[in-house]
Image: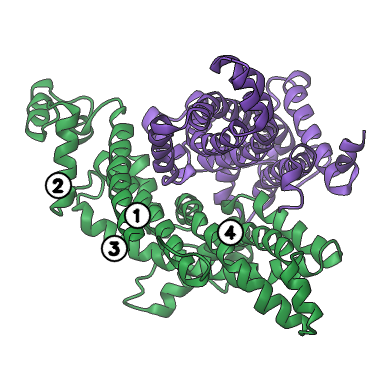
Chain colours: A purple, B green
């Protein structure tokens, strides 16, 4: 139980609480709320400040901001998780092959990865999304592809480190095949930093989705998404600042939770990095 | 010298790869430049004619070769949306954005380094908690959200600064600064949070090392120990991270310039993407990636200047 102690610190507890709350909301809100909750318009209460009927206020079409923010959680989390899973699915084999085999395979792959890293992730995601046409599926592809080089680089470094460990040499001397070696010895030992990095990537993916949707190149209406809500609020900032503050706070709390959770997870899983950041 | 030659060679190779990737990504687009020019309802024969004259019927490698050839000879093509030659257009927008990039990086560094050092010196005390929490909050908020808050406060609320637009620094530098300030601050705040975290982490590591203990044991003033011995060793890593953040900056600049209607490189790229202006997308994506790569090269070379322990071989 000693290893879980970092989660009991204020930072760890807040992180777990925030991430847990967002996950519960993302999973349960669509089940518990009526289908029309996010789209129902109350024309008499357009841009209404927080009231009893609308605890977080309403937007320019009189839609309840609390419902929209709760349902937006599902879109944001779904896109972020899918995108990060996608970048792991592509990045993991790339990184392992590169780090384990080395030589010209490593040279070619890492040259390509380094080149892709010259493209700012958000620019790459925006370009892919614009090229493929903005919708939910393409937003996932755009963010997933944009994050892959970064993850592949980290996995390659870890695979390289593990491949030089004495136990890998011992296994090799014992005649272990490459496939078995990767599955039995390399993969389990590079997982901790990969998990930590994935958590931090999730935070970035939430921000990227919000950015893409804010520019109209991510989630499309009528889906509720936090980035879209902030975009819609731009014209009403003077009269109804809460239309920006509510979804902005949702993004901030989610990303903050993921960052805190990631920091603590790193202390638990990757003791070499303890105290960084 | 050999090191620099090596770096330049790899730079050339990477530039070729960057251009190839840019060209490939923009060519999976459904529809082509001819369709963009004439519209989807156009006469098929006229469309075929335009395709032929634009060379769109050639194989992709041939088209890529022509594109690169044009770039090398200074012919970057014409933007479909702005109906202007792309080269001068990019140059003009790049200058506009340079102001924001320099300003936001300066804001970030000026605030982040002292804050990070302060947190590291008071490790695990309230000062550290305050600075670290603020930095964590900073990295958790999207830049465009900072932007909206700044507009609400400084433009709408206090009326001190304009909320949108761009002024040419050549015409009126002060006005240009006023327009560039809020976008730079929006970008700088997020950047500052990243750099504060990095400075704190690096300084924490350095302050725990032997030579710092020796310096203290010699009776040097704490101020000298921290700033002269500690920070001198942290400059390298912090600079590297700042260099890496240039990439992040050029991603965020697209969102922030669009929010503030600041007509720089980010705004231009966004317009190109939104209107599927393929020649302009290709050129601006290529230029941004090249600038990010160059920035990192410059940081690597500067590293040698600030850290005499590193010898190029």
Q: Residue at x 16, y 38 (%)?
A: B65
Instruction: Give the chain letter at badge 2.
Output: B
Above or below for A133 versus B266: above
Q: Which residue is mark 1?
A: B7
Q: Are marks 2 and 4 in contact (CB under 8 Å)?
A: no
Q: Please report whichever mark, 2 or 4, sits nearer to the chain's N-terminal start.
A: 2
Mark carried by residue B191: 4
Q: Quadrant of the C terminus of chain B?
A: bottom left
Can marks 2 and 3 be said to lie on one chain?
yes
Q: Report x, y in % for residue B61.
A: 18, 30
Mark carried by residue B31: none
| Residue A7 visible somewhere in the drawing | yes
Q: Quadrant of the N terminus of chain B?
A: bottom left
Q: Residues within 10 Å of mark 1 (few under 14, many from 20)?
A: some
Q: Which residue is mark 3?
A: B92
Instruction: Give the chain letter at badge 4.
Output: B
CA–CA distance in space, label 2 to label 3:
19 Å
Q: Which residue is mark 2?
A: B70
Q: Are marks 3 and 1 in contact (CB under 8 Å)?
A: no
Write down the quadrant of residue A65 in the picture.
top right
| Element type at mark 2 | helix
CA–CA distance in space, label 1 to label 2:
25 Å
Q: Nearer the viewer, mark 4 or mark 3?
A: 4
Q: Report x, y in % for residue B154.
A: 60, 68
CA–CA distance in space, label 2 to label 4:
36 Å
């Amino acid at each position: 139980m000693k290893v879980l102690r970092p989660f009991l610190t204020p930072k760890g507890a807040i992180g777990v609480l925030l991430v847990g709350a967002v996950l519960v909301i993302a999973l349960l809100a669509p089940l518990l709320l009526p289908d029309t909750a996010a789209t129902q318009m109350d024309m008499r209460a357009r841009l209404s400040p927080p009231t009893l009927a609308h605890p977080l206020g309403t937007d320019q079409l009189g839609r309840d901001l609390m419902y929209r923010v709760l349902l937006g959680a599902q879109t944001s989390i779904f896109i972020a998780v899918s995108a990060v899973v996608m970048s792991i699915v592509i990045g993991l084999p790339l990184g392992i092959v590169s780090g384990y085999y080395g030589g010209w395979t490593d040279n070619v792959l890492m040259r390509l990865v380094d080149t892709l890293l010259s493209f700012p992730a958000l620019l790459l995601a925006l370009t892919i999304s614009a090229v493929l046409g903005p919708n939910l599926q393409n937003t996932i592809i755009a963010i997933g592809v944009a994050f892959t080089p970064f993850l592949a680089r980290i996995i390659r470094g870890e695979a390289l480190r593990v491949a030089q460990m004495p136990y890998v040499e011992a296994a090799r001397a014992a005649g272990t095949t490459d496939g078995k070696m990767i599955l039995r010895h390399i993969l389990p030992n590079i997982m901790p930093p990969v998990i930590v990095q994935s958590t931090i990537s999730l935070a970035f993916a939430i921000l990227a989705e919000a950015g893409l949707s804010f520019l109209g190149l991510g989630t499309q209406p009528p889906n509720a998404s936090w980035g879209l809500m902030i975009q819609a609020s731009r014209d009403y900032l003077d009269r109804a600042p809460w239309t920006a503050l509510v979804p902005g706070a949702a993004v901030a709390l989610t990303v903050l939770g993921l960052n805190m959770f990631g920091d603590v997870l790193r202390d638990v899983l990757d003791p070499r990095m303890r105290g960084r950041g | 010298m050999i090191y620099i030659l090596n770096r330049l060679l790899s730079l050339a190779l990477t530039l070729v790869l960057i251009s190839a990737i840019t060209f490939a990504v923009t060519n999976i687009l459904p529809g082509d430049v001819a369709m963009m020019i004439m519209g989807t309802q156009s006469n098929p024969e006229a469309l075929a004619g335009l395709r032929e004259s634009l060379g769109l019927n050639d194989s992709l490698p041939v088209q890529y070769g022509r594109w690169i050839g044009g770039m090398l000879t200074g012919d970057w093509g014409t933007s479909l949306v702005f109906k202007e030659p792309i080269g001068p257009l990019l140059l003009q927008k790049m200058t506009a954005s340079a102001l924001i990039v320099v300003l936001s990086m300066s804001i970030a560094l000026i605030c982040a380094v002292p804050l990070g050092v302060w947190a590291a010196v008071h490790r695990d005390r309230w000062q550290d908690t305050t600075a670290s929490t603020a930095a964590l909050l900073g990295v958790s908020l999207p830049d465009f959200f900072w932007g909206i808050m700044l507009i609400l406060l400084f433009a709408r609320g206090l009326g001190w600064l304009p909320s949108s637009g761009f002024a040419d620094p050549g015409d009126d530098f002060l006005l240009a600064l006023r327009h560039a300030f809020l976008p730079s601050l929006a970008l700088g705040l997020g950047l500052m949070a990243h750099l504060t975290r990095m400075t704190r982490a690096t300084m924490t590591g350095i302050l725990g090392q032997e030579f710092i203990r020796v310096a203290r044991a010699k009776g040097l003033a704490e101020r000298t120990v921290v700033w002269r011995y500690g920070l001198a060793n942290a400059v390298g890593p912090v600079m590297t991270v700042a260099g890496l953040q240039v990439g992040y900056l050029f991603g965020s600049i697209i969102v922030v310039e669009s929010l503030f209607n600041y007509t720089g490189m980010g705004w231009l790229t966004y317009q190109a993407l939104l209107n599927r202006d393929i020649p302009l997308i290709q050129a601006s994506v290529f230029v941004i990636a090249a600038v990010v790569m160059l920035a990192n090269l410059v940081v690597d070379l500067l590293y040698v200047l600030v850290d005499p322990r590193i010898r190029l071989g």
